[in-house]
């Protein structure tokens, strides 16, 4: 059953006349009749009774008439809605990992309002969940630490963020001009859980540098780690963006010298995904905002 056949059928049903229906549909009467016959063949019975010059709907025709009108109206409404959506750019759907979203997104939201970016939906999730949502089409794109091993997706590096050492302001390390990896040896340390990409990257740093701090109180929550640092339970390496803004006055952070310690942050999207103007505007805003935020 084709939409064009339904259009021909509803026109005949409305006019009760094949000639006038053909004129309205701008096709020849034989062409219209052929399509009606095909439709009747598919449905397994006639749609019209011809009584001399009068055309009457059969029971099947009567049932199809109301259904066909609804289907055609729904089809037209859908087209108009989609045209409006495309014209306005649509609503963007993007995601960010749990060690990025809480810190960057409020910054992005405030700037999006100033830049007149259309409304958008945002999802926080672990990297694996975001990648799955990109693949199934739930998200236009996502912001995450890379590299990620998903060859079929497009990855664009949009910034680099350092991991910094956070500690009490009166800590012995805070007094050093430079903090080197060796200075962390045997230091009580509060690791970010390796459930996060950032946690795994920080763990790899310790393996490579042989810093060997005394790990204790691992947590998946950055806020929990910061509270423990405030209590003097140890120091921690965290993404810099987590420490910008309202950092407690009793804490300070410093970069580790002599090493390239940080993470690349990338936008990831599916190559077959259509990116509307509003999505592209949001992507550009995030890229610019990320670099000014953690730069």
Image (tube, rainbow, N blue to C red):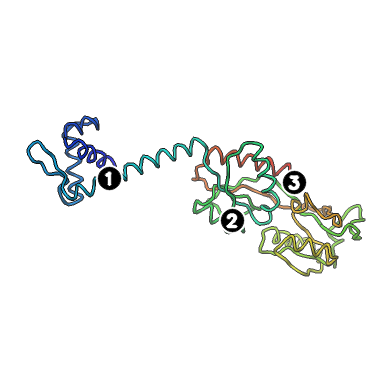
Mark closer to the chain start, 3 or 1: 1
Q: Which residue appears at 16% of the width and 44% of the height?
A: 57
Using the rendered view, name the quadrant where residue 69 is placed: top left
Label 3 or label 2, whichever lies nearer to me, is 3
How far, Cα to Cα, is label 3 from label 2? Answer: 25 Å
As helix, strand or loop, the secondary structure at mark 2 comes to loop
Q: Residue under label 3, please give it.
A: 294
Mark closer to the chain start, 1 or 2: 1
How far, Cα to Cα, is label 3 from label 1? Answer: 57 Å
Determine contact: label 1, label 2, CB under 8 Å: no
Q: Which residue appears at 35% of the width and 42% of the height?
A: 75
Q: Residue under label 1, please give it.
A: 68
238, above or below 16, in the image: below
Say few, some or many: other residues with alpha carbon within 10 Å of mark 1 (under 14 / 14 to 19 / 20 or more). Answer: some
Closer to the camera, 6 or 271? 6
Q: Which residue appears at 72% of the width and 66% of the height?
A: 219
Closer to the camera, 254 or 259? 254
As helix, strand or loop, the secondary structure at mark 3 comes to helix
How far, Cα to Cα, is label 1 from label 2? Answer: 48 Å
């Amino acid at each position: 059953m084709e939409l064009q056949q339904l259009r021909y059928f509803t026109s005949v049903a409305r006019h009760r006349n094949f000639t006038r229906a053909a004129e309205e549909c701008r096709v020849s009467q034989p062409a219209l009749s052929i399509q009606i016959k095909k439709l009747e063949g598919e449905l397994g019975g006639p749609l019209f009774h011809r009584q001399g010059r009068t055309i009457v709907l059969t029971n099947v025709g009567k049932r199809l008439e109301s259904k066909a009108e609804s289907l055609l109206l729904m089809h037209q409404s859908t087209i108009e809605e989609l045209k409006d959506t495309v014209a306005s750019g649509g609503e963007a759907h993007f995601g960010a990992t749990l060690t990025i979203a809480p810190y960057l997104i409020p910054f992005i939201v405030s700037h999006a309002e100033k830049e007149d970016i259309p409304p958008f939906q945002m999802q926080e999730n672990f990297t694996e969940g975001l990648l799955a949502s990109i693949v199934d089409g739930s998200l236009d794109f996502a912001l995450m630490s890379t590299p990620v091993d998903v060859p079929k997706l497009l990855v664009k590096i949009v910034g680099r963020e350092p991991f910094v050492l956070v500690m009490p302001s009166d800590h012995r390390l805070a007094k050093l001009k430079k903090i080197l990896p060796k200075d962390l040896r045997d230091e009580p340390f509060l690791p970010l859980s390796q459930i996060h990409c950032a946690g795994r990257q920080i763990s790899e740093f310790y393996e490579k540098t042989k810093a060997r701090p005394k790990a204790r109180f691992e947590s998946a929550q950055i806020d929990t780690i910061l509270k423990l640092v405030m209590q003097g339970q140890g120091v921690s390496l965290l993404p810099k963006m987590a420490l910008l803004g309202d950092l407690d006055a009793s804490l300070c952070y410093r970069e580790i010298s002599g090493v390239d310690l940080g993470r690349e942050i990338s936008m990831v999207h599916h190559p077959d995904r259509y990116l509307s103007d509003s999505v592209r505007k949001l992507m550009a805003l995030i890229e610019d905002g990320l670099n000014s935020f953690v730069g």
